[in-house]
Image (cartoon, rainbow, N blue to C red):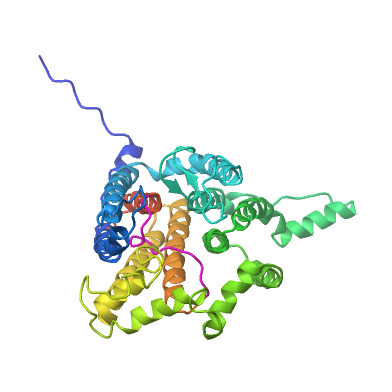
């Protein structure tokens, strides 16, 4: 009996099966591997002295969970990289609506999982399971939604209104300066940022705004709007500083840590600085940190970079920053060579989110900026956040599969 002929691949299937970008993939895997090693080194003492029913003095608690999530995240990254990223065009609005619903659930008692009266978390199954921050989903959803809409910007015709009425002339002027074009994006940002800010999660709102701004800027929106909106943002931060003790306290600890009680808000800052300073040029050696033994708060989370510097020294810290820099630069290279504008905008938004998160975390640890509560990608403990980060890398790898091959002369 003759064998059944194989079905010819469609053009879409051929594009989705192109070679992925190996330099980008290798940088992700290297950073993930280093992050897991540093997480185990930074967390085993914290886990060992934690007698809660969840940890039960198990020194391998954090690394075991993180490794499992890393494995699941790598599988998700691979599956996402095999999917044609063009499907994200129609999925983006659904993702945005879903993320807004999740953010609303953070305000509903019984469904949310508040920690210290902060409503940033939901449980994976709403009533049980590990927690995650819907803002992590929202920042990617906003980037993809903006990219899906703005990629058609060059083909859309400018709207015209009647010139016979004052309203029509006003609308024509607003269309000319680009205001009407920005209205739908502004509405989305007001809704998402409002829900995130009042959790409260100011740093999460900042990340959402940065990702959205990157996509808008690269799409060709006038730079003047960013100057104006940046001024509004600064004014809002100033207003929050005046009216909100939460923001004022963060700025006070940052600007005058010597005036803050070391056992209160200034404790984390000083212990992180001591950890970095004691690392020297080559570090104390892997696993030899002293500050992780009950001194640096949350060494497995926001402050993990200070432990890495203490153990690996200035040289090790430089290598970590170099790897992140190479990953970010390679991401922007993929954006420049993307097959279409949607792929370019999506890659720019995701890579800008990653670079902003790295800057904010390391800036806090080194005292460059106020405390933001942002984790370090691939290093800080947080399984669901790690899976989302790896899924984002999968989107970029999917986009890299469709980079046009160079022409042969």
Q: Residue lying farthest right?
A: 165
Residue in front for this viewpoint, 282 or 206:
282
Using the image as rendered, state which of residue 406 and residue 142 is in the foreground: 142
Q: Position of residue 128 (x, y in %)?
A: 44, 38
Relative vertical location of residue 69 with respect to residue 288 in this rendering, above or below = above
Q: Residue at x 35, y 44 (%)?
A: 80
- Image coordinates for residue 358, horizontal then vertical, percent: 41, 68
| Residue 34 in sight in this render | yes
Q: Is residue 202 left or right of residue 236?
A: left
Residue 229, image quadrant: bottom right
Q: Main secondary structure of the magenta part?
A: loop
Q: Is residue 113 left or right of residue 32?
A: right
Q: Residue 326 location, x and y as percent?
A: 32, 69
Count all numbered tags in the image, as a single digit: 0
Furthest-front residue in view?
51
Quadrant where the N terminus lies? top left
Kindly tell me whether residue 223 is visible in this rendering.
no
Identify the magenta region: 370-383
Q: Nearer the viewer, residue 108 or 293?
A: 293
In the image as oriented, which residue stretches furthest toward the left? 1
Vertical position of residue 298 compared to residue 96: above or below: below
Percent coordinates x, y for residue 66 in the rendering: 30, 53
Nearer the observer, 348 or 152: 348
| Magenta stretch: includes residue 270 | no
Q: Residue at x 27, y 57 (%)?
A: 25
Residue shown at the point (29%, 51%) measured from the top left: 70
Q: Is residue 90 left or right of residue 245?
A: left
Q: Is residue 373 magenta?
A: yes
In the image, is residue 383 above or below residue 377? above
Please name the residue shown 27% across and 55% down the image.
63
Q: Is residue 270 above or below residue 287?
A: below
Q: Quadrant of the C terminus?
A: bottom left
């Amino acid at each position: 009996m003759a064998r059944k002929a194989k079905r010819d691949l469609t053009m879409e299937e051929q594009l989705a099966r192109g070679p992925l970008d190996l330099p980008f993939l290798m940088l992700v895997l290297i950073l993930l591997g280093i992050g897991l090693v540093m997480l185990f080194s930074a967390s085993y003492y914290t886990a060992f002295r934690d007698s809660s029913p969840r940890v039960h003095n198990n020194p391998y608690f954090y690394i075991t969970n993180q490794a499992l999530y890393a494995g699941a995240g790598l599988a998700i990254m691979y599956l996402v990289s095999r999917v044609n990223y063009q499907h994200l065009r129609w999925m983006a609005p659904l993702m945005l609506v879903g993320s807004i619903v999740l953010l609303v659930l953070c305000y509903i008692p019984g469904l949310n999982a508040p920690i210290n009266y902060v409503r940033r978390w939901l449980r994976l199954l709403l009533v049980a399971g590990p927690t995650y921050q819907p803002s992590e989903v929202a920042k990617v959803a906003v980037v993809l939604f903006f990219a899906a809409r703005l990629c058609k910007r060059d083909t859309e015709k400018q709207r015209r209104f009647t010139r016979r009425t004052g309203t029509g002339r006003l609308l024509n002027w607003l269309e000319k300066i680009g205001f009407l074009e920005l209205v739908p994006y502004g509405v989305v940002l007001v809704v998402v940022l409002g829900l995130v800010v009042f959790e409260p999660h100011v740093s999460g709102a900042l990340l959402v705004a940065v990702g959205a701004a990157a996509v808008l800027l690269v799409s060709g929106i006038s730079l003047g709007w960013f100057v104006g909106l940046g001024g509004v943002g600064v004014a809002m931060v100033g207003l929050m500083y005046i009216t909100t003790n939460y923001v004022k306290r963060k700025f006070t600890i940052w600007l005058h840590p010597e005036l803050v009680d070391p056992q209160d808000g200034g404790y984390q800052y000083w212990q992180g600085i001591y950890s970095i300073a004691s690392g020297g040029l080559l570090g104390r050696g892997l696993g030899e940190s002293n500050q992780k033994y009950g001194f640096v708060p949350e060494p497995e989370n926001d402050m993990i970079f200070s432990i890495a510097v203490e153990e690996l020294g200035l040289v090790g810290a430089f290598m970590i920053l170099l790897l992140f820099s190479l990953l970010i630069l390679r991401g922007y290279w993929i954006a420049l060579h993307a097959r279409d504008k949607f792929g370019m905008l999506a890659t720019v938004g995701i890579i800008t989110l990653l670079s902003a998160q790295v800057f904010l975390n390391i800036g806090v640890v080194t005292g460059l900026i106020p405390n933001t509560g942002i984790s370090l990608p691939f290093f800080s403990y947080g399984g669901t956040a790690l899976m989302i980060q790896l899924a984002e890398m999968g989107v970029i790898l999917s986009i890299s599969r469709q980079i046009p091959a160079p022409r042969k002369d």
